[in-house]
């Protein structure tokens, strides 16, 4: 790589091409540009505009169900690509924009734990990672400074580490109610750690508890890389092209990546050449792009000699338990966001009948429209022959009076174990708005996940009952919860069974890298953004340090 | 989407079957769901226009109960659109929000440097005293 400082003109060859401007792409761009490398990033979405987010508007809850829904098949926007899900138990959730899916994420900041990197050694299942928690910790601590995490240090669920850069957010009445139950049972809890600063930080405003995190933060207070990383990267010379949908990574006769072909906003096909290509398009977009990039040399898709591209998709099956209380809990107040987290049943206990565990995040109950359709499931359904008035009418008033402002919700994220049968493939018919083949998911929730979620739902129910719940509602294995798209281009040291090495470098194409969550060998039982960004930082640091040895087209 | 007075009156009659008066809560039409909030709801969900229009057209202002029940049985998508718009419009009105104690999504002031109760009342200390939960990285 030339190391020529950035500011590349359109289509001029650059040192590094990054595909995707979400969390991992932003980390890569920022550090590469700061190191003096010329960088171009291609992002299919656009810059989000906080003024568009509906959180300050009266119709916020209604807009959340369509335009700002996290399922691209529901939003159905031209910048989204559709995903064929008829053979999947879970719908994948994502967002196409600078900042990627974090535009709509809840900002739970929960790094992987030490055992998550050693599940084979500790539990005899799946695979160990090529590195440990301790190897990753310096990168995590650096990322947390940039992200502006709010939280309280000293959580006994984790080894000691550097304090968070901003104080914890208030846990509110709903969080306090969750604590009542957990404290009574003697179970672990900790004030929620969130990617939302409580004081002004790195271009972010402080969280004002508006509670609309999952439709985009109109306050500019949820930490997303369009605010925290991209401005730095661009100041250092990185060039970010939005509305650019990459359809193929090209290779030369030597088997080296030469850049990418993309379709710009006007539908024109363009070519961006680069010495190194880094794919950061998430656990569905990345394997999709590699599978699209077939050539004589790579007839089964780029970097796919192992046959592992697209396999081992993990999406974290999710269940939720809602507790209804006599007390008023300010149920519409954020963060939304986790108020309180619990790792009481995170580690493996084989006597429970399943392996690994889950994290709980206590969240507020939401607005009045939300309580009529808890986690997307219609509460009312008139049976055959029943009258609409009998199930709506009075019942609607009673339901809202009982639940609105009186709820807290536990979200349960359980570790999803890797299985080769859970896959991303290309759909033979479905395409995006540019005619590029769409991905199709083949995904079944495993028996281990079923059993794990049943156990955790039962414990969560005990926790809300211990807090005095007068009613509990369980939504088991919610379909629209595939936020965490992991594992489909697994990292490992063996080229026969993995796609990239621990530094994200493809075994088959020495100047092709993957820095996103698709490389995760296992999924942990926590929200993965903290780990995705930390792994990307560790990898990009290595790429920068070794750049003079880097083979390039 | 522009609705004429007759369509608004029909919507009000249908909405009253779904959201009747009850205790302190007004019926949908008394909360004026058929006016500004109906417009706002439809404006924010253009994807529902077709289903809503079809659903409402199938209903009758003279026989609201009969027609909404027929719609539920024969055109669930149309029913869901009419129902969602009615319920959303209802809970967007100031009157209803006041009655249920919902100020909308607000931004209440707080002091991030205030010591939380759980740090002074011993609640969190009990968690700390129970010791680490994590399993350390195996050595060797």
Image (cartoon, coloured by chain):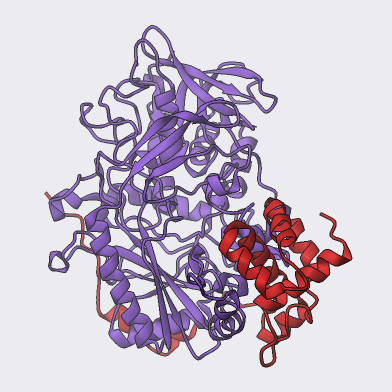
Chain colours: A purple, B red
Q: Residue at x 53, y 80 (%)?
A: A172
Q: Position of residue A76 (x, y in %)?
A: 60, 43
In the rendered image, the vertical position of residue A128 relative to residue A432, given as above or below: below
Residue A159 in view: no
Is residue A273 in view from this perspective? yes
Q: A405 or A430, which lies in front? A: A430
Q: Quadrant of the C terminus of chain A?
A: top left
State the image coordinates of residue A244 (x, y, percent, origin top left). 61, 29
**Rendering quarter of residue A477:** bottom left
The quadrant where residue A368 appears = bottom right
Residue at the extreme right of the image, as rendered: B5
The location of residue A184, given as percent across then percent down, is 32, 88
Taking the spot 46% from the left edge, 63% from the top edge, the residue there is A164
B140 sits left or right of A150 in the view? left
Question: Viewer-proximal residue, A72 or A429?
Answer: A429
In the image, residue A130 above or below residue A106: above
* Above/below status of A1 relative to A103: above
Question: Is A3 positioned to the left or the right of A204 in the image?
Answer: left
Q: Is residue A260 left or right of residue B66?
A: left
Task: State the residue lying farthest toward the bottom.
Answer: B23
Answer with left or right where residue A91 lies relative to residue A44: left
At x 63% / y 37%, what residue is drawn?
Answer: A78
Q: Position of residue B135 (x, y in %)?
A: 21, 62
Residue shown at 71%/73% (left/top)?
B64
């Amino acid at each position: 790589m030339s190391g020529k400082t950035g500011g590349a003109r359109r289509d001029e060859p650059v040192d590094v091409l990054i595909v995707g401007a979400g969390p991992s792409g932003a980390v890569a761009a920022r550090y590469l540009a700061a190191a003096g490398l010329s960088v171009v990033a291609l992002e299919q979405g656009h810059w989000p505009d906080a003024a568009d987010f509906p959180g300050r508007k009266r119709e916020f809850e209604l807009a959340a169900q369509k335009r700002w829904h996290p399922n691209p098949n529901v939003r159905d926007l031209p910048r989204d690509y559709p995903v064929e899900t008829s053979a999947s138990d879970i719908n994948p959730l994502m967002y196409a924009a600078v900042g990627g899916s974090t535009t709509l994420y809840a900002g739970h900041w929960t790094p992987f734990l030490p055992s998550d990197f050693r599940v084979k050694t500790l539990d005899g299942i799946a695979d160990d990672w090529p590195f440990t928690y301790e190897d990753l910790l310096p990168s995590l601590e650096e990322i947390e400074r940039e992200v502006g995490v709010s939280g309280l240090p000293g959580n006994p669920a984790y080894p000691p580490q550097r304090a968070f850069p901003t104080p914890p957010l208030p846990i509110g009445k709903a969080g306090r109610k969750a604590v009542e139950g957990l404290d009574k049972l003697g179970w672990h809890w900790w004030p929620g750690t969130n990617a939302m600063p409580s004081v002004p930080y790195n271009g972010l405003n402080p969280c004002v508890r508006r509670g609309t995190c999952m439709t985009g933060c109109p306050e500019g207070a949820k930490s997303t890389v369009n605010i925290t990383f991209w401005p730095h990267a661009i100041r250092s010379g990185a060039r970010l092209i939005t509305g650019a949908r990459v359809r193929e990574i090209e290779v030369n006769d030597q088997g080296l990546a030469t850049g990418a072909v993309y379709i710009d906003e006007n539908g024109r096909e363009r070519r961006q050449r680069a010495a190194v290509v880094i794919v950061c398009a998430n656990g569905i977009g990345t394997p999709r792009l590699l599978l699209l990039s077939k050539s004589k040399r790579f007839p089964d898709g780029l970097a796919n000699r192992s046959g592992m591209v697209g396999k081992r998709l993990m999406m974290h099956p999710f269940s939720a338990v809602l507790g209804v209380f006599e007390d008023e809990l300010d149920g519409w107040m954020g963060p939304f966001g986790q108020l309180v987290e619990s790792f009481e049943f995170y580690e493996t206990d084989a006597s429970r009948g399943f392996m690994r565990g889950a994290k709980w995040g206590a969240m507020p109950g939401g607005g009045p429209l939300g309580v009529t359709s808890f986690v997307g499931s219609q509460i009312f359904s008139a049976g055959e022959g029943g009258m609409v008035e009998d199930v709506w009418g009075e019942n609607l008033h009673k339901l809202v009076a009982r639940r609105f402002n009186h709820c807290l919700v536990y979200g349960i994220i359980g570790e999803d174990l890797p299985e080769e049968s859970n896959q991303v493939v290309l759909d033979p018919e479905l395409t995006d708005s540019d005619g590029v083949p769409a991905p199709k998911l083949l995904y079944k929730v495993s028996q281990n996940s079923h059993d794990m979620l049943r156990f955790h739902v039962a414990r969560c129910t005990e926790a809300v009952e211990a807090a005095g719940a007068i009613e509990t509602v369980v939504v088991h294995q919610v379909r629209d919860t595939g936020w965490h798209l992991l594992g489909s281009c697994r990292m490992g040291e063996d080229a026969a069974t993995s796609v990239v090495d621990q530094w994200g470098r493809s075994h088959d194409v020495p100047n092709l890298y993957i820095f996103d969550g698709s490389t995760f060998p296992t999924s942990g039982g926590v929200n993965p953004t903290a780990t995705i960004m930390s792994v990307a930082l560790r990898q990009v640091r290595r790429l920068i340090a070794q750049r003079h040895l880097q083979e390039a087209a | 989407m522009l609705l004429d007075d007759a369509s608004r009156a029909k919507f009000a009659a249908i909405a009253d079957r779904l959201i009747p008066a009850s205790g302190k809560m007004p019926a949908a039409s008394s909360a004026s769901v058929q006016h500004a909030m109906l417009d706002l709801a439809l404006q924010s969900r253009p994807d529902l226009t077709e289903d809503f229009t079809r659903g409402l057209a199938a209903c009758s202002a003279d026989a609201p109960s009969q027609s909404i029940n027929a719609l539920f049985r024969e055109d669930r998508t149309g029913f869901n659109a009419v129902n969602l718009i009615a319920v959303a419009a209802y809970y967007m009105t100031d009157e209803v929000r006041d009655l249920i104690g919902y100020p909308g999504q607000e931004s209440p002031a707080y002091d991030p440097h205030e010591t939380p109760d759980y740090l002074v009342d011993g609640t969190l200390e009990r968690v700390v005293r129970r010791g680490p939960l994590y399993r350390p990285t195996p050595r060797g």
